[in-house]
């Protein structure tokens, strides 16, 4: 049986497959479809210090091979996630979690990160500086190397758990931001968040999504995500959680060859709630097909013909 285990900052995962933040709720919703303990980990819905209702509807537009979302960080706030959602998830899911944290100021990121740092089951803090759907926060921190480094430095000095910074692809040179967060002390990088896009309704002649623009995800962005992970792998020494359009075991292998140590699966969960289960089931056979005995050995394998 091939070895599917991988490690992120000293945390061993049975396999690299992690549902991406915002596509898997708080996890327990999916336990009626399958045993969610087969997952490598779960990245929880992006959480802010205070509850947020999110953006006006419609928030979703379909595109060929993907979708555009403009959810706007709807969530019940850090205290409710820690007090209600995580305990509910903990009844069925027994592995370390990834807490996905957003904010509108450096202080807010720090306050929220501190709260999740104190939660026993949280293994990694994923700091989202790349949400394209809110004004005055989210992506505005992730599109400048200076502000990305500022958030990273502030959070790192306030917490003890590994800090992974979730990067935006909506920049000219993602390697510059990656290097800045590494230099500021990040333990790892999650990438990529969604790409800003829009659709226009020909009948109303107005944008389909109420917020006009939104983040594109799905299989249509996989080649772009692979290219960016490949470039960032060559620019930093910290682990990368790769995501963007992964929908089968072969995509997982491709993303790891580009440089990812683990992966997140996002839009595929919205098409099929059992997508992660099926990818995990396919992994051993797909590894055997490509002559891979130990999955963690292939990270970055596409570089230097390794
Ligand atoms: C959202 O809630 O708008 C999506 C989160 C994100 O893209 O970071």
Image: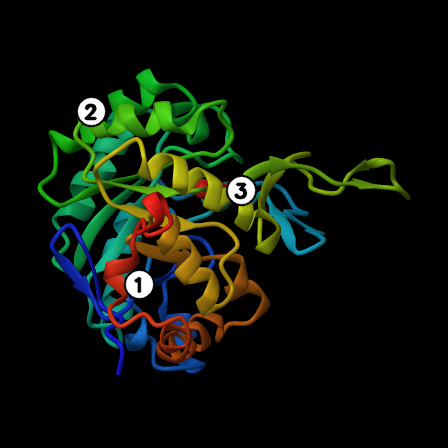
Q: Nearer the viewer, residue 240 or 259?
A: 259
Q: Any atom of ligand 1 within 8 Å of the CB at mark 2?
A: no
Colouring rule applied to residues: rainbow
- What SS does tag 1 mark? loop
Query: Quick check: 105 above or below 230?
Result: above
Answer whether labels 1 and 2 touch (C-beta < 8 Å).
no
Dot 2 alpha-carbon crowd within 10 angstroms: few under 14, some 14 to 19, many 20 or more: some
Residue at left 12%, top 38%? Answer: 159
The quarter of the picture where the N terminus appears is bottom left
Residue at the (32%, 30%) spot, across then down: 178
Circle 3: element type = helix
Label 1 crowd bin: few (<14), some (14–19), many (20+), radius 10 Å: many
Furthest toward the front, the residue is 305
**Residue 128 seen in the figure:** no
Please give the residue where the numbered disc 1 appears in the rendered image: 16
Q: Which of the numbered marks, if any, corresponds to residue 145?
A: none
Relative to 252, residue 55 above or below: above
Name the spot of residue 45 as percent of width and height, x first.
39, 53
Residue under the image location 43 percent in, 57 percent down = 254
> How far is disc 1 from disc 3 in space, using C-alphas?
20 Å
Q: Is residue 289 visible?
A: yes
Q: How far apart are marks 1 and 2 (CA)?
A: 26 Å
x and y, in percent, of residue 279 in the image: 44, 72
Quarter of the image where one finds residue 26: bottom left
Q: Distance between the residues labelled 3 and 2?
A: 25 Å
Residue that carries the numbered disc 3 in the rendered image? 224
293 shown above or below 126: below
**Which residue position is annotated with label 2?**
183
Query: Where residue 196 sits: x, y (%)?
Result: 59, 35
Camera-nearest label, 3 or 2: 3
| Residue positioned most to the top | 146
Where is residue 219 shown, x and y percent of the image? 58, 55
């Amino acid at each position: 049986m091939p070895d599917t285990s991988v490690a992120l900052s000293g945390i061993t995962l049975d396999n690299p497959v992690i549902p991406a933040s915002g596509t898997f709720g708080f996890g327990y919703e999916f336990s009626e479809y399958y045993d969610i303990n087969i997952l490598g980990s779960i990245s929880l819905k992006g959480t802010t210090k205070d509850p947020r209702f999110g953006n006006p509807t419609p928030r979703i537009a379909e595109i060929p091979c993907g979708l555009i979302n403009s959810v706007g960080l709807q969530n019940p706030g850090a205290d409710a996630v820690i007090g209600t959602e995580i305990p509910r998830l903990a009844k069925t899911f027994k592995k370390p979690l990834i807490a996905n944290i957003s904010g509108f100021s450096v202080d807010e990121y720090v306050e929220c990160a501190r709260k999740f740092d104190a939660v026993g089951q949280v293994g990694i803090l994923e700091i989202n500086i790349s949400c394209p759907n809110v004004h005055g926060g989210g992506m505005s921190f992730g599109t400048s190397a200076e502000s990305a480094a500022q958030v990273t430095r502030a959070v790192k000095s306030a917490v003890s758990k590994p800090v992974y910074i979730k990067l935006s692809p909506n920049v000219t040179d993602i390697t510059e931001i990656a290097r800045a967060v590494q230099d500021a002390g990040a333990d790892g990088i999650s990438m990529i968040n969604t790409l800003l896009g829009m659709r226009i309704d020909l009948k109303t002649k107005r944008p389909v999504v109420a917020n006009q623009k939104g983040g594109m995800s799905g299989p249509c962005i996989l080649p772009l995500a692979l290219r960016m992970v490949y470039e960032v792998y060559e620019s930093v020494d910290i682990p990368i959680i790769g995501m963007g359009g992964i929908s089968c075991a072969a995509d997982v292998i491709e993303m790891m060859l580009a440089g990812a140590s683990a992966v997140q699966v996002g839009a595929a969960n919205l098409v099929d709630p059992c997508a992660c289960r099926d990818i995990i089931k396919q992994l051993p056979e797909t590894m055997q097909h490509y002559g891979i005995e130990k999955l963690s050995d292939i990270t970055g394998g596409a570089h230097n013909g390794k």
